[in-house]
Image: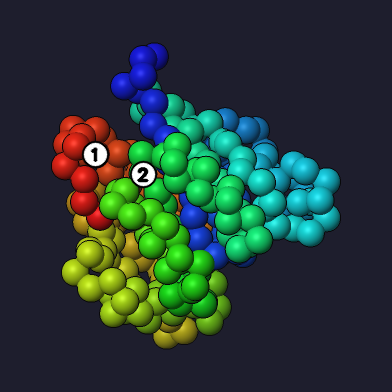
């Protein structure tokens, strides 16, 4: 493996949006771990400090080495709590790309807006989490993001929701296939993110120096 086979990405966003769970799913799905840890159980890879386990929040920057398609992706899980914003700054400096994690229940959060601003011109994508849960409204969340950031937002998936607005089908525009069937699971969602992150990062590597958001 050479330096060209290594990618550094930062997970940013509001506290409680699911960044640590996203990193955990990436590790589990790529067989980086043999069990899926949960924040509520205090056994995630990234939140290992006693205080993090007790408070069920991330306090310090943590790393999750994910191997996918012969590429090592160093996933940096940055705390979303504003008290630990310095950790997010460190992650941004080291990352070549960022994933801003949001929540389909909460819509556009202050943490998402702040992360966007902190990134400057660094490439980024947004990942809307918890789309399959009750009371989630993915469509409204996307519209709020578009209203805030305008033409900088270009969805790379198309969705179908049920009567309760929970997403049941996701069509991967970049992949040209239906990523999920009628029953979306968190594991399938994370699988799509890994694939899409890989695509975006490879595009970035092929066009290094062009920048853009």
- Local packing at callout 2 (Cα closer than 10 Å; few below 14, some 14-19, many 20+) is many
Q: Quadrant of the C terminus?
A: bottom left
Q: Quadrant of residue 6?
A: top left
Specify whether residue 184 is in view: no
Residue in front for this viewpoint, 184 or 94: 94
Indicate left or right for 24 with 159 as reference: right
Where residue 50 appears, as percent x and y from the top left, is 83, 46
Q: Nearer the viewer, residue 35 or 71?
A: 71
Residue placed furthest toward the top: 1
Q: Nearer the viewer, residue 96 or 153?
A: 96
| Mark 1 or 2, nearer chain start | 2
- What residue is shown at x 40% (from left), y 48% (from top)? 98
Residue 72 location, x and y as percent?
Answer: 43, 27
Q: In this view, which residue lies farthest toward the bottom? A: 163
Q: CA distance from mark 1 to mark 2?
A: 8 Å
Q: Is residue 160 above or below residue 77?
A: below
SS of the residue at dot 1? helix
Compared to residue 46, the image places residue 81 above or below, namely: below
Residue 204 tag number: 1
For the N terminus, the image quarter is top left
What residue is drawn where x is 42% and y is 57%? 118
Residue drawn at 41 percent across, 52 percent down: 99
Query: Mark 1 Cα within 10 Å, few/some/many (few <14, many 20+)?
Result: some
Determine contact: label 1, label 2, CB under 8 Å: yes
Q: Residue 208: image x %, image y %?
A: 20, 35
User: Which label is found at residue 173?
Assistant: none
Residue 97 - label: 2
In the rendered view, does 25 fall on the left or right side of 144? right
SS class, disc 2: strand
């Amino acid at each position: 493996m050479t330096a060209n086979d290594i990618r550094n990405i930062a997970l940013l966003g509001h506290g409680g949006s699911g960044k640590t769970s996203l990193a955990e799913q990436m590790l589990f799905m790529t067989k980086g771990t043999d069990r899926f840890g949960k924040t509520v159980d205090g056994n995630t890879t990234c939140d290992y400090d006693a205080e993090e386990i007790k408070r069920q929040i991330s306090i310090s920057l943590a790393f999750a080495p994910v191997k996918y398609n012969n590429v090592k992706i160093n996933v940096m899980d940055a705390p979303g709590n504003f008290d630990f914003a310095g950790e997010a700054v460190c992650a941004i400096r080291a990352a070549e790309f960022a994933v801003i994690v949001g929540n389909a229940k909460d819509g556009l959060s202050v943490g998402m807006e702040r992360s966007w601003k902190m990134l400057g011109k660094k490439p980024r994508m947004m990942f809307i989490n918890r789309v399959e849960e009750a009371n989630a409204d993915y469509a409204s969340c996307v519209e709020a993001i578009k209203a805030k950031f305008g033409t900088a937002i270009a969805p790379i998936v198309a969705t179908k929701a049920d009567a309760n607005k929970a997403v049941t089908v996701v069509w991967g525009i970049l992949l040209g296939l239906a990523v999920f069937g009628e029953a979306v699971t968190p594991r399938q969602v994370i699988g799509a993110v890994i694939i899409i992150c890989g695509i975006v990062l490879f595009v970035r590597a092929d066009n290094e120096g062009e920048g853009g958001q």
